[in-house]
Image (spheres, rainbow, N blue to C red):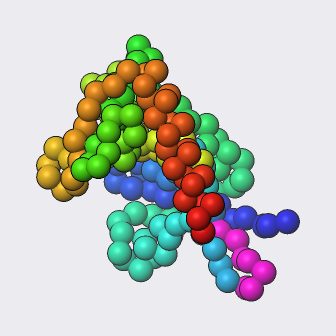
Amino acid sequence: MRQYRYFAILSKYSPNVDDPALVARKWTDEAGETREEVYTKDLEWAPGNTTWRIRTGKQDGEVVPITEEAARRFEEIQAERVRSYLPADGKYDYYAILDTGFSVESPRKLVRRWRSPQGLELEQRYTHGSGWKRSDVLYRISTDREDGEPVLITEEAADRVKEVLAERVRRARAEE
């Protein structure tokens, strides 16, 4: 069983150890290597290197050791932060992202966008296997940083697109 050490990551905007910007955890793997994960806005532990970046001066902030209990409290804080950005009315706008050779029935990507209670426009991209993940696809298209044509579709059409994307992944895996 892994023995984790937990750390609050403080910043000038989140200087309080009871409400940190981020929480990281470290452990030593079977090969003797120290590993690090951070608790993300996707509400999961993911590989990271934040403590190293701060300690080497590559990132501003402070690393403060905390208890496992404090890390669990942060998981609740992070979940509340995420919930506070969900659409107040529960409604999303869905977009099929088209490229040459793709149609609305079989787009390259599926994105949903909404306005948070704070007035922010947020978006997520659908990925088979991981579900909805934060993204900036529509922003990147609107600023010519990514190719594609976003086409507004219904929620029902978005559900069909999910199946199309899942089938595309299954076919690709079968060809490997």
Could you tell me which quadrant the C terminus lies in? Answer: bottom right
Q: Residue furthest right?
A: 1
Question: Is 116 located above or below residue 26 in the figure?
Answer: above
Q: Quadrant of residue 138?
A: top left
Q: Is 12 on the left-hand or right-hand side of 53?
A: left
Of residues 92 and 96, the one drawn nearer to the viewer in this rendering: 96
Q: Residue 53, how many percent across, how many down?
A: 43, 73
Q: Residue at x 73, y 64 (%)?
A: 4
Magenta-tinted stretch? 26-32
Could you tell me which quadrant the N terminus lies in? Answer: bottom right
Is residue 25 at all visible to an observer of this figure?
Answer: yes
Q: Residue 62, how many percent across, how many down?
A: 45, 64
Q: Residue 162, how many percent across, how many down?
A: 50, 36
User: Is residue 81 found inside the magenta-colored segment of the image?
Assistant: no
Q: Residue at x 57, y 55 (%)?
A: 171
Question: Is 67 located above or below residue 29 in the figure?
Answer: above
Q: Residue 164, how many percent across, how many down?
A: 50, 40
